[in-house]
Image: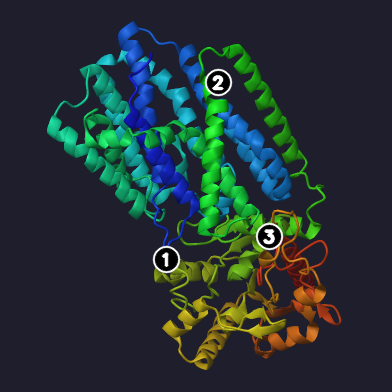
Amino acid sequence: MKLTYRPEIDGLRAIAVVAVILYHAQITIFGHQPFEGGFIGVDIFFVISGYLITSIILKELVTTGSFSFRYFYERRIRRILPALLFVMLASLPFAWMYLLPSSFIDFSKSILYSLGFSSNFYFHYSGQQYGAESGLLKPFLHTWSLSVEEQYYILFPIVFLVIFKYFRKYLIHILILGFVVSLGLADWGSRKHLSFNFYMLPTRGWELLAGSILAYFEITKGHRSKNKTLNLILPATGLLLIGHYILFFNDEMFHPSFYTLFPIIGVCLIIWFSNKDGFITKILSIKLFVGIGLISYSLYLWHYPIFAFSRITNFTDANILQILFLVGSVLIISIISYFFIEKPFRDKKSNFLKILIILIISILALFIFNLTSIFKEGFKKRTHFPEVIINTYETLDYRQNFQNGLACHNRLGDKGFCIFNELPENENKGDIVLLGDSLTDALLSNLIKQVSKTKFRLIHMSYSGNLYLPNFVNFNKDLNKIVSDESVHNFRKEFLENKTHKNTYIIFYGDYNFFFEKRLKIQNDKIIEYETPELYSLRKNIYLNSEIRKIFLKEKIKESLESLSKNKKILLLYPSPISPVSILDHIKINKNNIVKDKDFFLKDKVNYSKNFFRKYNLEIVNFFNNLRVKNIYKIQLEEIFCNKDQCIFYDNKNAFIFDQAHPSYEGSKKINDLIMKEIKRIEFKSN
């Protein structure tokens, strides 16, 4: 059933899509991103979709007494699939040229899930935080919102028709109840389950239902507001609410939640109180806004993959001219896409059967290609990527997915640690506990695999940026709040001292030099020490005198290890292997598919002499060598990474240090092999 065309709705679409594009473009002016709340544009789209879809369904039911599912879904297919499939097909050559295997697999999975209208599930369960830097490199992250809408298009007409047929008297009550329940769930979820809350239909449904409620009142009343004063004031109020949130909202605020209600009210005010003589309606109805609104779907589809590939290829680095060029490119491509893809396929004169055949062939092609990509491990044998680059980017995924908060089945509430390889008490041979900072976190993924083959339980207690030990409460309060919380700290200490197995091995490992204020970098082809701004801030806030700080650190480490060693065995890993450069700074792939720094793999740039390694770590090594504590087993990591003359952190196949300090998966495997070997040696000796 055809609805009366409302150009101001297209104007609203224009505001929504421009807000989203400006948000994803990450335009920075004087160090500030003025469109941090631009993601609210997606919420605007949801309200518009709810309003239009409910209007179509209800108007047809009221005027004809029936509803054609076939006609409804045919319109949805014509509207959504052709442009979406075209963007996916067009992205494949760029993915082939620029995505490394691990990224290619993620890319393929996102497309397959999107084809199944479920990419929101994929991004939620893969742990992708929307707005995070890693998400900016995923070309189809934005399809999560399309999946939410498509799920709504599938479910809502069926549910609505049942309610209309059997509970028509209570239709509006049920819509309002659904709105309230969904909003309440969203507000609760925004504090407890952030990812699910952001990506899923149950917590987004209230935004769609807001539009549905407007449509119900409009069709049952036969009109919208006729109050001239309100029609003059409230659309402007609505526009101000939307504008305020685009400019001043940010992705650190709870969303969606009660906070999101205000821009949603703003959209509803414009939809309900707009009339052809209103000032805001006239503004939203000008050709520029309407034109952008008409191509808004193509703009939304194209902008994210174009931005993502530009970042992957290092085309732009927040350069305003380059960003404007990209935005202009998105606009031109979207106009072409609208006139040559969207319009022809939506034309009723186009035979739907022929359209269906084209769509099915396209879906099959995408399905086969991307399924093959997964089975072929992201087409690893593409020759334009050096093996070390491929392996290093795999370690990038490893760091993102397996460090700092790896999901586990037995997390002890909010107490900040996990237990793996849980065994019945009579089968548990002992506990292996990870203590330290993010370097210790880096050991976790591979250690889980190694420990799973034993009768040991693995307890993960390390934390990024915090050299956690039982006597370190409040030491790093600025870097890690959960560890500095005294109740949490005491819980962890109590568990560690009294609830672990009598046969317990504590692995203590960390970036000791970070806490002793030393770092390395290359300057004028020389390796120098420097202090990071974070370290300076921490030192300034806690201990101005670095010598006092070092004395304090040594005393606390000794005190904690002595306390723990009374009834536990301690595996002390040192010194921390520190690379003079970060491989991440050198392996960006540029538009010519070559390594950014062609000299990066020269051995004297990425590895250094054994003498320098010893000199750099001399203070730490002397301290630990002279540490006299019972039940302590010292593991020198030098024997893993160094030969007779040189310390090797990169070879032709692998990076053993991921950035400058964190072991890669291959590096962690080397360290864990040594740990497990030492535990076997101690166990054998004990028996």
- Please give the residue where the numbered disc 2 appears in the rendered image: 345
Mark 3 crowd level (few <14, some 14–19, many ≥20, 10 Å Cα): some
Residue closest to the eye, 535 or 337: 337
Image quarter (top left, top right, bottom left or bottom right) of the N terminus:
top left
**Image-based side of 385 in relation to 490, left or right:** right
Residue closest to the eye, 501 or 331: 331
Q: Is residue 530 above or below residue 673?
A: below
x and y percentages locating residue 92 in the rendered image:
69, 39
The amino acid sitting under disc 1 is: Phe
Cα separation between marks 3 and 1: 26 Å
Look at the numbered disc 3 and give the secondary structure of its residue.
loop
Mark 2 crowd level (few <14, some 14–19, many ≥20, 10 Å Cα): many
- Please give the residue where the numbered disc 1 appears in the rendered image: 30
Image quarter (top left, top right, bottom left or bottom right) of the C terminus:
bottom right
The amino acid sitting under disc 2 is: Phe
User: Taking the image as drawn, is residue 566 in sight?
Assistant: no
Q: Earlier in the sequence, mark 3 or mark 1?
A: 1
Look at the numbered disc 1 and give the secondary structure of its residue.
loop
Quarter of the view holding residue 593: bottom right
The amino acid sitting under disc 3 is: Lys
Cα separation between marks 1 and 2: 44 Å
Q: Nearer the viewer, mark 3 or mark 1?
A: 1
Colour logic: rainbow
- Please give the residue where the numbered disc 3 appears in the rendered image: 588
Q: Earlier in the sequence, mark 2 or mark 3?
A: 2
**Residue drawn at (58%, 45%) of the image:** 306
**Residue drawn at (55%, 21%) of the image:** 344
Mark 1 crowd level (few <14, some 14–19, many ≥20, 10 Å Cα): few
Residue sitting farthest toward the front: 287
x and y percentages locating residue 414 in the rendered image:
45, 58
Residue sitting farthest toward the right: 644
